[in-house]
Amino acid sequence: MNKINSKITDLLGIQYPIIQGGMAWVAEYHLAAAVSNAGGLGIIGAASAPADVVRTQIREAKKLTDKPFGVNVMLLNPNAAQVAQVVVEEGVKVVTTGAGSPEKYMELWKAAGIKVIPVVASVALAKRMERIGADAVIAEGMESGGHIGSLTTMCLVPQVVDAVSIPVIAAGGICDGRGLAASMMLGASAVQMGTRFIVAHESIVHDNYKEKVIAARDIDSEITGAGTGHPIRCLRNQMTREYVKMEQSGASFEELEYLTLGSLRKAVMEGDVINGSLMAGQIAGLVKKKQSSSEIIQEIMNQALNLLG
Ligand code: TUI
């Protein structure tokens, strides 16, 4: 297999420029280890987990792979400070962050030799991240599932590429070789993908959820929570309809947050696709089958290499 060498494959010591998103509940150690073993970068998503759960996840991943993998620190997590410490103690090589600015942990992580790669949704945040020492940024468009910004990938990626000199990873609306090739054309050095890995064989997501992703059409996702300042993209179902109703009747931010995060666990672990939160990106319409992480990566690489000539 040919490779696409990029600043990111060099920086992270991985074979292919494909990073698996640090999806809350979904990105646990089985998936992360499988993606890393397949030559990409697997990520454990700490989401709202307590620090000791994250520690166990890291230790389990190490038993399954000797390749590099990362941890995503979700900055709205009340346990984020403890998680930030655990990644250092456990010798994690790469940290990505989401849903905020990781400024206050930067010194700690850089001193430990960790490669820090924040997710950004704007040029301003990308520039700030470069200034404080980020090794790369993930420019994530609002096509993504879960917590999103407001710009599209097509607009955000080239603007971030022009604004910073550190490598840029494109995310949001990418699930195949066309998306990878297009991202390279926009100046990105790698892609991050979430939705396609939800349906990977190694993903522990309940089969009902996987089937919903596979059945989804282009127009089947919806943004909830725009009014709370924390917009979340999910597949439309009874939960999203309930959410909209609660939002209109003036429910508090905490009540709404509880509804989405609590219901994500329900969807992932119990397969409750009616009341559960089915976070997924707009690209779900293009995700057609369950495959191993290795098949997914090989297929994307073959397609991208053909296109890039
Ligand atoms: O973080 C994500 N996606 C997520 S996190 C998540 S768990 C959650 N559930 C309920 C409420 C909140 C979170 C589910 N999906 N993606 C990375 C991402 N980060 N997308 C957008 C951003 C972002 C947005 C604004 C990062 C920084 C930012 O501004 C920070 C600042 O201080 O300017």
Image (tube, rainbow, N blue to C red):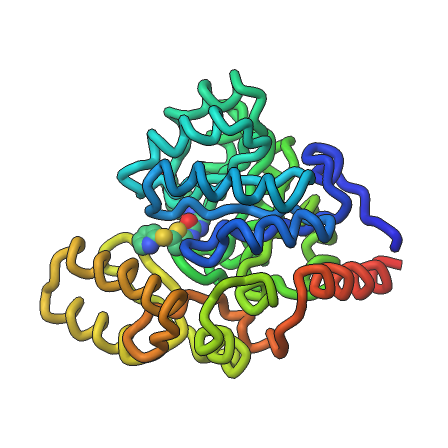
Name which quarter of the figure residue 278 lies in: bottom left
Name which quarter of the figure residue 76 lies in: top left
Q: Position of residue 268 (x, y in %)?
A: 40, 66
Question: At 34% across and 75% down in the image, what residue appears?
Answer: 272
- If the image is split into quadrants, where does the N terminus sit? bottom right
The answer to whether residue 225 is visible is no
Question: At 17% across and 54% down in the image, what residue appears?
Answer: 254
| Viewer-nearest residue: 222 or 81 | 81
Q: Position of residue 249 (x, y in %)?
A: 10, 70
Q: Position of residue 55 (x, y in %)?
A: 44, 37
Q: Position of residue 276 (x, y in %)?
A: 32, 71
Farthest residue toward the top?
111
Question: At 70% across and 32% down in the image, what residue appears?
Answer: 11
Name which quarter of the figure residue 274 lies in: bottom left
| Viewer-nearest residue: 166 or 116 | 116
- If the image is split into quadrants, where does the C terminus sit? bottom right
